Image: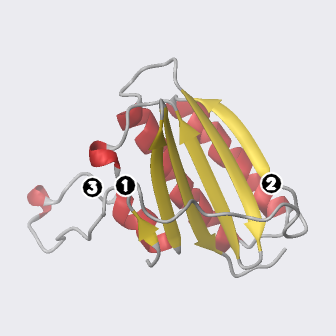
């Protein structure tokens, strides 16, 4: 993936208002696994209705699932009073996803690099996790994270092959 930036790097990804045929998709959800699951179903359905291919929908869903589940698990660490705001902006050849939450900041105020895991090990030694940020970065063209007072802001640009 190119164009990733730590906090203090380039400005957040932008989408001009009115770009593309469809308006932005916006959701606000509680920071719970159930709310994340329901939101992913809803977003994937909405994207499909707007003409995105199943391949595009699956890629966007995979990235959002990793991001949203990380927020629930790590930023809120099991708290049930958290919130997450999500906005997807369709732009030519991509969808820009913006995710904001009021949870704890990312370690070092930067998004993890993510790296491939060694899978050439005995079955008992296979890692249980640690694939999320690698997957997010592999499926995204650009990524930007910053922390404003009391708030995490993450933007990712995901390429799409379909052009609704």
When asked about the image quadrant of residue 70, the answer is top left
Between the C-alphas of marks 3 and 1, the distance is 13 Å
- Depth check: give the residue in front, 54 or 114: 114
Of the two numbered discs 3 and 1 on the same chain, state the one appearing first in sequence. 1
Between the C-alphas of marks 2 and 1, the distance is 24 Å
Q: Residue at x 67, y 63 (%)?
A: 14
Q: Residue at x 72, y 39 (%)?
A: 27
Residue 24's disc number: 2
Locate the N terminus by quadrant: bottom left
Between the C-alphas of marks 3 and 2, the distance is 31 Å
Q: Which residue is mark 3?
A: 130
Residue 125 in view: yes
Locate the C terminus by quadrant: bottom right
The correct choice, above or below, for 87 with respect to 152 in the image is below
Callout 1 secondary element: loop
Callout 3 secondary element: loop
Give the left or right position of residue 58, taking residue 108 as reference: right
Q: Which residue is mark 1?
A: 111
Residue 31's disc number: none
């Amino acid at each position: 993936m190119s164009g990733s930036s730590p906090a203090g790097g380039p400005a957040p990804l932008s989408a001009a208002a009115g770009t593309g045929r469809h308006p932005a998709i916006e959701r606000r959800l509680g920071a719970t696994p159930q709310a994340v699951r329901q939101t992913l179903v809803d977003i994937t359905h909405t994207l499909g209705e707007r003409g995105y291919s199943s391949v595009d929908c699956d890629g966007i869903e995979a990235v959002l699932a990793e991001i949203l589940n990380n927020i629930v698990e790590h930023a809120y660490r099991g708290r049930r009073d958290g919130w997450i705001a999500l906005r997807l902006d369709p732009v030519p050849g991509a969808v820009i996803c913006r995710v904001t939450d009021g949870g704890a900041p990312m370690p070092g105020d930067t998004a993890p690099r993510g790296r491939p895991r060694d899978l050439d090990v005995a079955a008992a030694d296979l890692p249980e996790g640690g694939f999320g940020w690698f997957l997010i970065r592999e499926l995204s063209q650009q990524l930007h994270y910053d922390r404003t007072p009391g708030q995490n802001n993450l933007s990712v640009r995901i390429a799409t092959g379909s052009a609704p």
